Image (tube, rainbow, N blue to C red):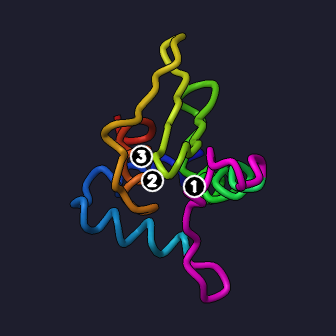
Amino acid sequence: MREEEDYIELLKEMTDNKINWFIRGNLIKAGKKLRFDFTGGYDDAPKTDGILHNQKILNTFAYLGLYDSGEFVSLRFHKGCPILMLNYDGRIHTYEDNLIGMTTTDIIQEIFKLTILR
């Protein structure tokens, strides 16, 4: 728990650019950069494969307490557009329009701002 708090304090002191590099470093696995699967919502795309893949990417940051701020963090894509749902303060908050056009790193940074950095 203390290590988690130390990371969060460090992140709060970082610039957006440094946070992006921190995220990128966590996304590199076996020499490959993990990226969200943006294909959800298309008729020919399997619905569960992308959801599970994207959840695994979010789970990469669970050690920071990403899920501690509420009951769930859910990221889905509909025809390439991200839909982020967070449950905190006893309500479900949905974020869509402000995430359009963002990269995997940008979306994760936005999730940080809405969860562990708020």
Residue at position x 44%, y 40% in the image: 116
Marks 2 and 1, Cα distance to the nearest angstrom?
9 Å
Q: Residue furthest front?
A: 43
Q: Main secondary structure of the magenta part?
A: loop
Instruction: State which tag comes first along the sequence, 2 or 1.
Output: 1
Instruction: Name which quarter of the figure residue 76 lies in.
Output: top right
Residue at position x 35%, y 42% in the image: 113
The residue under label 1 is: 61
Residue type at mark 2: give it: Ile
Instruction: Name which quarter of the figure residue 97 lies in.
Output: top left
Residue type at mark 1: give it: Phe
Residue nearest the viewer, comparing 4 with 107 = 107
Whether residues under marks 2 and 1 lie with C-beta atoms below 8 angstroms apart, the answer is yes
Tell me the tag on residue 112. Answer: 3
Whether residues under marks 2 and 3 lie with C-beta atoms below 8 angstroms apart, the answer is yes
Q: Is residue 66 above or below residue 3?
A: above
